[in-house]
Image (tube, rainbow, N blue to C red):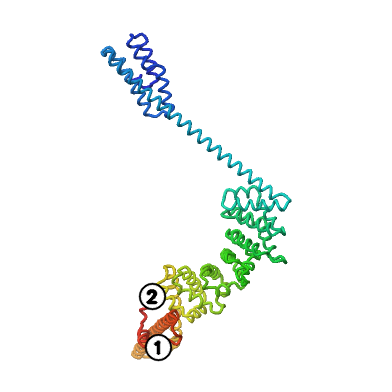
Amino acid sequence: MAKIHQNNVRSLVLDHHHHSTATANHHRLWTAFSAAAFRRKIFNAVSCGGSSRFRQEFQQDDISVTTSSTNLESKNEKPQEKEKPERQKKEKQKQRKGSEKLSDLLNLADVEGEISESETRKKEEALEELKRVVKELQVEDEVKRREGACKVRLLAKENSEARVTLAMLGAIPPLAGMLDFEDVDSQISALYALLNLGIGNDVNKAAIVKAGAVHKMLQLIESPNAPKPLVSEAIVANFLGLSALDLNKPIIGSSGAVPFLVKTLKNSHNQSSSQAKQDALRALYNLSIFPANISYILETDLIPFLLNKLGDMDLSERILSVLSNAVSTPEGRKAISVVPEAFPILVDVLNWTDSPGCQEKSSYILMVMAHKSYGDRQAMIEAGIASSLLELTLLGSTLAQKRASRILERLRVDKGKQVSESYGGNLGATVSAPIYGSSSTSTNTNGVTIANECLEDEEDMMSEEKKAVKQLVQQSLQNNMRRIVKRANLPQDFVPSEHFKSLTASSTSKSLPF
């Protein structure tokens, strides 16, 4: 009987064979679990995924049937008749639940099929529309091509998949060819269509440059008839987008785009919008990241213009970013140092407490230049950098504090060297070898004398260093006082009180961060 319970189907067949010659009571028991019930069990198992719950119920029913047939002689007919309606009721409930679940599954499959079909249909329609747009770009009629460019501009504006598909269908070469049209509307439509195709897509940016679009844009700029402001702004926007790709930086930088961008940035006749100036400055920053482009930037007067524009808070941080890239080359550092008032301007930026980004970038520029050139360090000291650095080490950001400390350390080393050089000759005169043939007593006496003189000179050197540091601190405090007076809009002939002078006179080197 244990083997019979291993397989539900087998148990049913064997049970039917065992009771085929049984009494009427036995026959009625098999009728209660007939072929219809077997089909219902299979239906429930299939509709419910053959779960273990229904298999367990199936086995329990099979066990109950087998047990009933084994102990049938000891039971009467009345309990069997009472159990029969209950079993049929349970089977009907199981059948109803299985039918409902199967119906739900079928409905869900139908809904998913309809959704997938609708999505497929939409994708096919979108692809056909893109194919029609690209075909419009390839016709000879300029009006249709301009309409096609307008459609590309709209389709690629916010749809990344459309940008990829349009480029794969060949939309970029005909759009680049439209830049040769004399119609301004066609030029603008083509420029903005190319701009949108390159948004967030490096492959398309490289393909646009490869199609010769940069050369054609420069031809529009250099044409005898000056381009319309809208065309110039669209070209600047394209240079900004294309220069974001590292592969395009050397191509655009050597193409002659830098003078055009500088001209747009410097436009004093207000022919360029503020957005165009922002785009031009950002494009120049992208190009300055590539070191070989610094030489093209230095051929213009961009560096003096940028230094003089510091103070415009809309442009200052980006200006300092360009200058930070420029100081990476010796030519760039020289171009900055030769600008009149360059160091006072950069030192003044260190005091912009409301713009920590500008403080960090200005301190970086000064740190690089201080590390590379002694003459630049002297110019910084003359510009009053010490007081600003001391303030920055206390109130600046973590990065600005580190850079300010490095500059101060470099200035301190220079001050120590100056003191050593000023007493170098005296030290050489006092230290001499003993005279050959002299007695040991005279030798010892001379050695003591020389040692004493060295100690005295060393004390003099230390006192001179302290004096130099003290003088530096006093100068810093006085410079701070002058800045406070200037910010408070006090009279220019304002004289600090005697109490303040006494404070500065009694300051020691302990106020320095080193």
Cα distance between the residues tagged 2 and 1: 44 Å
Q: Is residue 32 above or below residue 343?
A: above
Which image quadrant for residue 265?
A: bottom right
Which image quadrant for residue 222?
A: bottom right
Which amino acid does the dot numbered 1 rest on? Pro
Nearer the N terminus, badge 2 or badge 1? 1
Which image quadrant for residue 259?
A: bottom right
- Bin the neighbour count of mark 1 within 10 Å (Cα to Cα): few under 14, some 14-19, many 20 and up: few
Q: Is residue 291 visible?
A: no
- Residue at figure coordinates x 56%, y 52% from the top left: 158
Q: Locate the C terminus and report the quarter of the image it occupies.
A: bottom left
Name the residue carrying label 2.
513
Is residue 33 found left or right of 259 in the rendered image? left
Classify mark 2: helix, strand or loop.
loop
Q: Is residue 58 above or below residue 276?
A: above
Which amino acid does the dot numbered 2 rest on? Pro
Q: Locate the N terminus and report the quarter of the image it occupies.
A: top left
The residue at the far left in this view is: 74
Name the residue carrying label 1.
434
Q: Viewer-proximal residue, 506 or 222?
A: 222
Percent x, y of residue 392: 42, 73
